Image (spheres, rainbow, N blue to C red):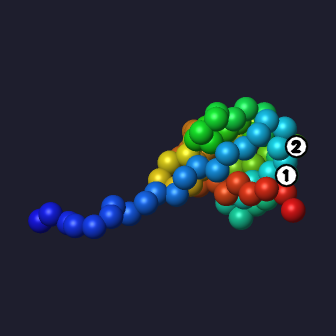
């Protein structure tokens, strides 16, 4: 069956700048982090933080997929927000 109308729009990856402070939330834990690598389109990020978060010690790589960031190894959703 052919569907008419607009296709559902996927959320665009936000863009981040190197050095930008962010808050990561994963597995009900939060960590203050800093962006150390970012692609221009926002689809790939590397962040650095003090501590241990869901199996990651100090650094984590994130990829944008299906409207959210996912950690590279476990494919778990990671929420990334600007610091207040």
In the picture provided, is 42 more to the left or to the right than 16? left
Q: The residue tagged with tag 1: helix, strand or loop? A: strand
Label placed on residue 32:
1
Q: Is residue 61 visible?
A: no
- Viewer-nearest residue: 66 or 48: 66
Number of disc labels:
2
Mark 1 and mark 2 lie on one chain; the one further toward the N terminus is 1
Q: Quadrant of the N terminus?
A: bottom left
Residue shown at the point (55%, 52%) measured from the top left: 12
Label placed on residue 15:
none
- Viewer-nearest residue: 21 or 30: 21
- Does residue 60 sit above or below 3 in this rendering? above
Q: Is residue 52 visible?
A: yes
Q: Which quarter of the figure has residue 20?
A: top right
Residue 23 coordinates in the image, percent (x, y): 79, 55
Q: Which quarter of the figure has residue 27?
A: bottom right
Residue shown at the point (22%, 67%) measured from the top left: 4
In the picture as drawn, the residue positioned furthest to the left comes out as: 1
Q: Quadrant of the C terminus?
A: bottom right
In the picture provided, is 69 more to the left or to the right than 65? right
Structural distance between the alpha carbons of marks 1 and 2 = 8 Å
Residue shown at the point (79%, 36%) measured from the top left: 18
- Viewer-nearest residue: 2 or 46: 2
Q: What residue would you read off at disc 2?
A: 50
Mark 1–mark 2 CB contact (< 8 Å): yes
Residue 69 coordinates in the image, percent (x, y): 59, 50
Local packing at callout 1 (Cα closer than 10 Å; few below 14, some 14-19, many 20+) is: some
Local packing at callout 2 (Cα closer than 10 Å; few below 14, some 14-19, many 20+) is: few
Q: The residue tagged with tag 2: helix, strand or loop? A: strand
Residue 21 coordinates in the image, percent (x, y): 84, 48
In the picture provided, is 6 more to the left or to the right than 82? left
């Amino acid at each position: 069956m052919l569907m008419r109308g607009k296709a559902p729009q996927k959320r665009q990856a936000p863009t981040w700048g190197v050095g930008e402070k962010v808050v990561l939330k994963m597995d009900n834990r939060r960590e203050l982090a800093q962006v150390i690598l970012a692609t221009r389109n926002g689809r790939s990020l590397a962040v650095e933080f003090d501590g241990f978060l869901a199996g990651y010690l100090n650094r984590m790589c994130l990829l944008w997929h299906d409207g959210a960031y996912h950690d590279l190894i476990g494919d778990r959703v990671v929420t990334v927000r600007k610091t207040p």
